[in-house]
Image (tube, grey):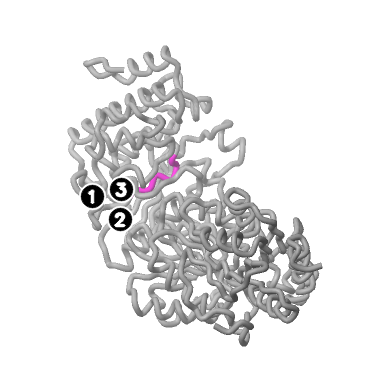
Amino acid sequence: MSALPGKPESLRDAYGQALLALGERDPNLVVFDADLSGSTRTVLFGQKFPDRFFNVGVMEPTMMSMAAGLALQGRTVYASTFAVFAAGQAYNFVRQSICYNRANVKIVATHGGLLVGADGGTHQIVEDIGLMCGLPGMTVIVPADAPTTRAATFAIAERDGPAYVRLTRENLPTVTDGSFAIGKAAELRSGSDLTIVAVGSLVARALEVAEELSQVGVSVRVLDFASVKPFDAPALLRAARDTGALLVLEEHSILTGVGALVASAVAENYPVPVRRVGVPDLFGESGEPWSLLDRYGMSKERIRDEAWELLRGRGKVQ
Amino acid sequence: MPEVVPDEVIRSLEATAREIRREVIRMTFAAQSGHPGGSLSVTDLLTALVFHELKIDPAKPTDPDRDRLVLSKGHASPAMYGALALRGFLPREELASFRQLGSRLQGHVDRTKLPYIEASTGCLGQGIGMAVGMALDARLRRASYRTYAVIGDGECQAGPTWEALMAGGHYRLANLVVILDRNGLETDGPTESIMGIEPIAEKFRAFRYHTIEIDGHSFPAILDAFAEARRTTDGPTAIVARTVKGKGVSFMEGKHQFHGKAPTKAEAEQALVELGRAPEGRA
């Protein structure tokens, strides 16, 4: 596995193509979208399988109920829209119609986080991972690249029950070999002085910072925690034990996201210093996508500073 | 053209409905919680569905060809449990466990716990959407089963109710029947003084539903409406069933105070007498 990010690719294209393949494989599979099928790429499925594709317009809550109604008849159902609508607008419908009913609905939400960019804070949901992780029985996956998106799209089909996959609008560099498995963290780089736990768009930055630090003799482990729930606690606790400090990176509110999960798991089981890099308690705003990450506290400089802070605390550097 | 239903069938349905109403009183009294008012208003509709209209078999509750029933107003669970118990889907003795810890009889109907609960509901505005999904499934697999959604009138204030109705109309789901228990009262008082939903029949028609308005306590009228829905092949049917909240118990009728309040011992006794308490006198 290459230690540095590869060329940027579209996660949404990977999803659309994987969905097509699933549609060939399973004649009972049904797909829903809410007037964003071009953006989410479910349009590819819709063109190939028009009878099994329902574009319901701007009714995300009811889309979730309809998807559940079909799923309860023994079907696998995928439902896509932007994350702010899937997790935000439709929250209680995901909760009751899908999760409480144990309906086999796979929500693949695109446009999560600040990288939505120009559309601004209304559409940049940074709370969705927390909302979805709180739902009993929900699987939550945040792919970092196109190969993981493809693998996750297939993996959730194999696992009975609801799932939420958070994709990002921007193309992301390939950082994995696509060997994703639900419940498993991927160790993208080995290391002994510090572990960076990252998800989604920030995994590539984690690898870049780890490479920089290696130039000055610091050994950083990088874990891609794409499977946020179920959570790979053994890999996390191994990292805590082996490296003694954890830095968590996520394009999500630090109050309810992966950093909060990591901090509580570590505090309960193997207390070591943890620092969280993510979105503070703020809404986003319009802007160039990657500049937004920098502005809201997720720049490479900030990540490097937090890493140094942890390393200094451990006496690894001056 | 009304379907001819023999008088003894009507009388039998009326007797069954009285028995279900007595169970509603016993359940909500025993639990000292629950929703008697909206259970009593919907009892005749559920009785007509479970004992006459629906193609269902207690021996085969998961038969793929069974008709689907979604009780979107999931708080009317006592009426649903009473009907299912009398129809043989669960032991009648189990009704005493309503709302108790560990019971299959949850406060709001839960499909993961009981046979022939097609969808877990409770938070309003979600049942029709699930019913639309079921009706779409039948269409996709060319199955003959029909889907019935029973909704409340307070629920008609919820936006997603109209999203789901719009979808049923858009897809012209002739295998879908939406039944409104129009008892006129919600938790805090009359729907029309809180947030009016009238003219409700015109709204359903505007959403492309063949709409029938009936007395929701008249079995001949209910069965006629179901038959008319079956004859309607170009789109979904909505039945606006005018009902009385607390129907059958004099001091509960038309009282929003009994929406979510259990009867006291004295009230339960009187209610059972009014409902023609069963000869064995179990209360």
Q: Is residue B168 visible?
A: no
Q: Nearer the viewer, residue A197 or B223?
A: A197
Judging depth in this view, the residue of B46 and B202 nearest the camera is: B46
* Disc 3 target residue: B226
Picture residue at 35% right of the left edge, 49% below the top: B118
Front tag of 2 and 3: 2
Choose top left, top right, bottom left or bottom right for residue B274: top left
At label 1, the amino acid type is Lys
Image location (x, y in percent) of residue B217: 35, 34
Residue B70 x/y as whole percent: 38, 48
Of residue A21 and residue A43, the one placed in the foreground of this image is A21
Q: Quadrant of the C terminus of chain B?
A: top left
User: What x and y, as percent, mark residue B205?
Assistant: 47, 55
Circle 1: element type? loop
- The residue segment tinted magenta is B69-74
Disc 2 target residue:
B146
Residue matched to label 1: B55
Indicate the chain on which mark 2 is placed: B
Asked if marks 1 and 2 touch (Cβ < 8 Å), the reply is yes
Look at 57% across and 65% down and name the residue there.
A58
The first of marks 2 and 3 along the sequence is 2
Q: Residues within 10 Å of mark 1 (few under 14, many from 20)?
A: some
Rendered residue at 52%/54% (across/down):
B162
Q: Residue A296 lies in what quarter of the image?
A: bottom right
Amino acid type, label 3? Phe
Alpha-carbon distance for marks 3 and 1?
A: 13 Å
Q: Is residue A10 magenta?
A: no
